[in-house]
């Protein structure tokens, strides 16, 4: 299988590329390498997959020194001409879109970045998939799409029409756009609603990274919603295993599906959406305590109200994933945190 993975200088993308390469797939990785967070971490992720950052030349493929089946290209999805050229030349079988402008709070002050990367970029990808007979497009959505929904656990059958951040709105838009292309052009698409992913090589803007760094530097951590937040923290290897299994199972059209009574995550078109989460919400204060225990050091805490755009809790109902794909994430938060901190200490010599 020849797979395009977008976002391979990113957290999940790097891990997914390694997983597919290790099982023998041919992979082309794509990333814009923007400066949303420290670029050095992105370059080091690329190095881990055998890509020499010094060899990167925008718009041109470079080969991995570690994996014979891996090549990488620096390219923006907003660059429609570049995207179309890549698809025409490479003849991909399947595509996994993990490239996006991430972050809820950043979207409050930088909305344009989300429209360009998450809407315009995704449209270009859909167009390329449509014109080049891609067998399956799997794309990252987010638990953020559940917005003001308070019915727990979050089910893919629930209404997701009330987002509370532009980031969430852009991810919901991706699901709508994907369904349109599945309906009009028969493109099989699967949306992947990830729930608070964490683990080694993670993003520096995420809570685990921020908390670990601050505690080690004897700086206070910001604890929002006075510690009463709950998150369905999901370890990165569990996310990747779910993605791989889903990529291997393109959705098929269901002509019997009823738009009035049918599951909102299905369709008459070859379209579906899955939650990928640990199905075990953890209180933020308990999460912090696990970090403290792993580090052997207590955090200085600055208790703050909930931030605009945040939701108080997330909780994934993964029943369809279990029934249809035969998979359920299972890594405990304590194990996942320990693995992250082991990596963090080694990477930063902390």
Image (tube, rainbow, N blue to C red):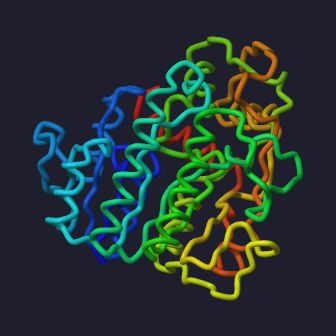
Q: Is residue 43 left or right of residue 330?
A: left
Q: How many marks?
A: 0
Residue 331 percent across, percent down from the top left: 66, 59
Q: Is residue 185 left or right of residue 273?
A: left
Residue 85 percent across, percent down from the top left: 16, 57
Query: In terms of depth relative to the viewer, which is nearer, 336 or 46?
Result: 46
Query: In terms of depth relative to the viewer, which is nearer, 254 or 290?
Result: 254
- Outermost residue, right direction? 151
Indicate the quadrant containing the N terminus: top left, top right, bottom left or bottom right.
bottom left
Location of residue 249 with respect to 77 vertically, above or below: below
Residue 341 percent across, percent down from the top left: 56, 38
- Outermost residue, bottom direction? 256
Name the residue located 62 percent from the left edge and 65 percent from the top edge.
273
Location of residue 254 with respect to 50 vertically, above or below: below
Name the residue located 31 percent from the left edge and 42 percent from the top edge.
78
Name the residue located 47 percent from the left edge and 66 percent from the top edge.
181
Q: Is residue 189 left or right of residue 348?
A: right
Residue 283 percent across, percent down from the top left: 83, 38
Location of residue 130 with respect to 256 vertically, above or below: above
Name the residue located 77 percent from the left edge and 33 percent from the top edge.
289
Query: In terms of depth relative to the viewer, which is nearer, 227 or 248?
Result: 248
């Amino acid at each position: 299988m020849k797979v395009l993975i977008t976002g391979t200088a990113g957290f999940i993308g790097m891990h997914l590329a390694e997983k597919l390469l290790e099982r023998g797939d041919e992979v082309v990785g794509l990333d814009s390498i923007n400066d949303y967070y420290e670029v050095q971490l992105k370059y080091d992720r690329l190095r881990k997959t055998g890509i020499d950052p010094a060899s990167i030349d925008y718009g041109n493929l470079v080969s991995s020194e570690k994996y014979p089946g891996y090549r990488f290209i620096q390219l923006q999805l907003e660059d429609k001409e570049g995207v179309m050229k890549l698809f025409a030349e490479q003849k991909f079988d399947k595509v996994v879109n993990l490239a996006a402008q991430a972050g809820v709070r950043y979207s409050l002050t930088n909305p344009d970045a989300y429209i360009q990367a998450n809407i315009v970029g995704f449209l270009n990808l859909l167009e390329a998939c449509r014109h080049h007979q891609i067998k399956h497009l799997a794309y990252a959505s987010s638990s953020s799409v559940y917005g003001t929904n308070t019915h727990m656990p979050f089910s893919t059958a629930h209404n997701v029409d009330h987002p509370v951040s532009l980031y969430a709105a852009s991810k919901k838009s991706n699901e709508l756009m994907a369904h349109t292309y599945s309906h009009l052009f028969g493109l099989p698409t699967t949306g992947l609603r990830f729930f608070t992913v964490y683990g080694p090589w993670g993003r520096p803007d995420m809570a685990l990274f921020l908390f670990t760094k601050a505690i080690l530097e004897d700086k206070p951590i910001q604890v929002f919603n006075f510690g009463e937040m709950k998150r369905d923290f999901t370890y990165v290897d569990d996310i990747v295993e779910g993605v791989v299994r889903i990529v291997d199972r393109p959705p098929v059209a269901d002509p019997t599906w009823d738009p009035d009574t049918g599951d909102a995550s299905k369709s008459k078109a070859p379209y579906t959406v899955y939650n990928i989460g640990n199905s075990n919400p953890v209180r933020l204060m308990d999460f912090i305590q696990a970090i403290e225990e792993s580090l052997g050091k207590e955090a200085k805490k600055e208790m703050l109200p909930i931030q605009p755009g945040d939701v108080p809790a997330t909780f994934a109902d993964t029943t369809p994933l279990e029934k249809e794909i035969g998979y359920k994430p299972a890594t405990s938060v304590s194990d996942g945190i320990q693995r992250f901190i082991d990596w963090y200490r080694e990477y930063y010599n902390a």
